[in-house]
Structure formats: C-alpha cells, structure tokens
Amino acid sequence: MKLKIDNEVLIEEFFEGTHLLGIVAPIKNFQFVWHINELMGYGFTINHDLEISLMKKGRKYFFSIYEYKIPGSCLVHYLYHNQHDGEYLLPEFKHLDFLWLTKGDDVEKEELHGLQQMIKTIPGVQLVNEMTNEKIKNKQHLIL
C-alpha cells in the first residue's frame, strides 16, 4: 500500500484560523522588520529553519521568514519576503513585497484592522491588503 500526502487537506489545515496580509513596501526586508519592531513593539527575528526554498528554472531560490511569537499566547506572526533575485514566492502577487500571516490564536476583525493601520504608518509602506485564501494559487508555498 502506497501512502500519499493529500496536499489539499494539508493546505486546508495549515490555513485554518489564519489571516494573511499582503504588503507593498519596496524597502529591504531587514529595514521593514526593524521599523515593525521599533514602531509596534514586536520582536520579529529571522528564522532560518523556516526559510522556504523553491526550485525554479533549474536554480534554487530562498525566501526569508521572520517570526514573532506573542508572549503568553499561541498567536504567532510570520512575515514572508515575497521576492528573491527576481523570483516570487507567490508569482500571482508579484506586486507584493511582503506577506504577513497570523496563526495560532484567532485574531478579531478589529485587531486585524488595527494591525493593518499600524503597518501603514511604517515608512515605505504603500499598501496593506487582507488576502483571501481563495485568491492564492500557490498556497503550498506558504506552508511551514
């Protein structure tokens, strides 16, 4: 008997209770993270163990992931850099520079809206959009 991983179930379970924001901020990822940590009091750090590597055109591309676990909570914020050397983690959203995923505890709509408003105050940020999972073709690229 051959066991097969059901990607649809895996994707569905991973995204259950998550929220995803798309961010246009054409600045370096370390600058963006520094501003978040300074202005919002977060503690994002790069997590090399979560780094995503994709094989495209016979070459490996690496996408950084920053992580911040809310103390005393199950809520974790992940910040994906959507671009590396001309390739995209989510090619269907080439205009986005960063993807912000909340996972673990449910985030209320008001809290998510407040988060969006705070991100918009960061220098260099041009757009912050909530994204629905249905519009994302390459959801599997976001699974950690």
Image: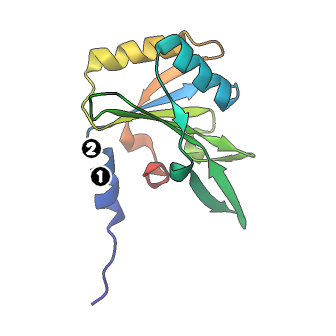
Q: Residue at x 29, y 14 (%)?
A: 110
Q: Is residue 2 above or below residue 40?
A: below
Residue 109 visible in rendering = yes
As drawn, the residue found furthest toward the bottom would be 1
Residue 125 in percent (x, y) is at 60, 17
Q: Residue at x 58, y 47 (%)?
A: 89
Amino acid at dot 1: Glu
Q: Quadrant of residue 8?
A: bottom left
Residue 25 visible in rendering = no
**Disc 2, SS:** loop
Amino acid at dot 2: Glu
Image quadrant in which the N terminus is located: bottom left
Query: Where does label 1 land, which residue?
Result: 12
Query: Where does label 2 land, which residue?
Result: 16
Q: Residue at x 70, y 29 (%)?
A: 28
**Disc 1, SS:** helix
Please tell me which residue lies in front, 41 or 57. 41
Q: Is residue 141 above or below residue 95?
A: below
